[in-house]
Image (cartoon, rainbow, N blue to C red):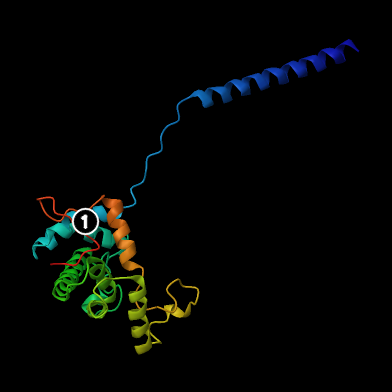
């Protein structure tokens, strides 16, 4: 009888010690300063192309738009793949035909220069220029005829016109759950997304050394 009591006592004592040790370990980790997790830069993939973008823009005296192109590339590809500017189609090629980032940047910057120049001529606002990188210069003409200021509603209207021209091509792959459907030509939210990227990159985008800023809601003069 005494042996059983001693055995139970030893078991109870052992469990008590075990729980005590576990409690001490828990207290130690709760009091220890937590190691801060390193934040991942969502723009890391495109920032590596910044020098190339700036160099290519300099050929057109447009270095001031470097951050705009970084934000634009973020929307296009996050800096991934052989055509990070998704410039193949702007050159009249099939999607992802270009498989060289250097060539992609050359063609993409050339396309940006084209829409920027035409946008200035038509006196549209800057969001229209950005949207035109995605939808082409025809969108600039359309906006110029409808007040000169971009809106997602105008982008939808323009998209719908293009869809009617080629319904079998611009059908969102037949996916009616696609957020763009039935406005399957381009992405009517494109400008909104790129401008959001611009603001995440910097509070405001400097466009010259004298502190001049791009005013997203204003027309070019």
Residue 131: name its quadrant. bottom left
Q: Secondary structure at mark 1?
A: helix
Q: Position of residue 4 (x, y in %)?
A: 86, 15
Q: Which residue is under mark 1?
A: 67
Is 1 positioned to the left or the right of 208 in the image? right
The residue at the point 17 percent across, 70 percent down is 116
Is 181 positioned to the left or the right of 1 in the image? left
- Return the residue found at the far right: 1
Residue 98: name its quadrant. bottom left
Do we see residue 71 in this rendering? yes
In this view of the protein, which residue sits in the foreground, 56 or 5? 56
Is 169 positioned to the left or the right of 175 in the image? left
**Which corner quadrant holds the N terminus?**
top right
Do we see residue 77 in this rendering? no
The residue at the point 36 percent across, 68 percent down is 189
In this view of the protein, which residue sits in the foreground, 117 or 214? 214
- Return the residue found at the far bottom: 165
**Which corner quadrant holds the C terminus?**
bottom left
Q: Position of residue 9 (x, y in %)?
A: 79, 14
Q: Position of residue 187 (x, y in %)?
A: 36, 72
Query: How many neighbours does mark 1 have within 10 angstroms: few (below 14), some (14-19), or many (20 or more)?
Result: many
The correct choice, above or below, for 68 with respect to 211 in the image is: below
The residue at the point 25 percent across, 50 percent down is 202
Residue 195: name its quadrant. bottom left
Count of numbered marks:
1
The correct choice, above or below, for 168 with respect to 118 in the image is: below
- Return the residue found at the far front: 147
Q: Position of residue 175 (x, y in %)?
A: 48, 77
């Amino acid at each position: 009888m005494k042996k059983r009591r001693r055995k139970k006592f030893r078991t109870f004592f052992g469990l008590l010690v075990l729980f005590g040790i576990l409690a001490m370990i828990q207290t130690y980790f709760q009091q220890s300063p937590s190691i801060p997790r390193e934040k991942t830069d969502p723009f890391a993939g495109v920032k590596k192309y910044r020098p190339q973008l700036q160099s290519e823009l300099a050929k057109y005296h447009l270095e001031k738009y470097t951050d705009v192109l970084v934000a634009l590339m973020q929307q296009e590809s996050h800096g991934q793949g052989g055509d990070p500017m998704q410039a193949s189609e702007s050159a009249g090629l099939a999607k992802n035909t270009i498989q060289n980032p250097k060539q992609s940047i050359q063609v993409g910057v050339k396309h940006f220069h084209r829409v920027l120049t035409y946008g200035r001529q038509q006196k549209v606002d800057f969001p229209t220029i950005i949207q035109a990188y995605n939808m082409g210069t025809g969108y600039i003409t359309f906006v110029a005829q409808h007040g000169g200021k971009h809106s997602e509603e105008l982008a939808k209207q323009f998209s719908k016109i293009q869809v009617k021209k080629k319904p079998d091509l611009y059908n969102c792959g037949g996916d009616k759950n696609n957020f763009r459907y039935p406005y399957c030509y381009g992405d009517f939210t494109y400008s909104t997304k790129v401008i959001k990227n611009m603001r995440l990159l910097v509070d405001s985008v400097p466009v010259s050394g004298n502190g001049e800023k791009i005013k997203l809601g204003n027309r070019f003069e």
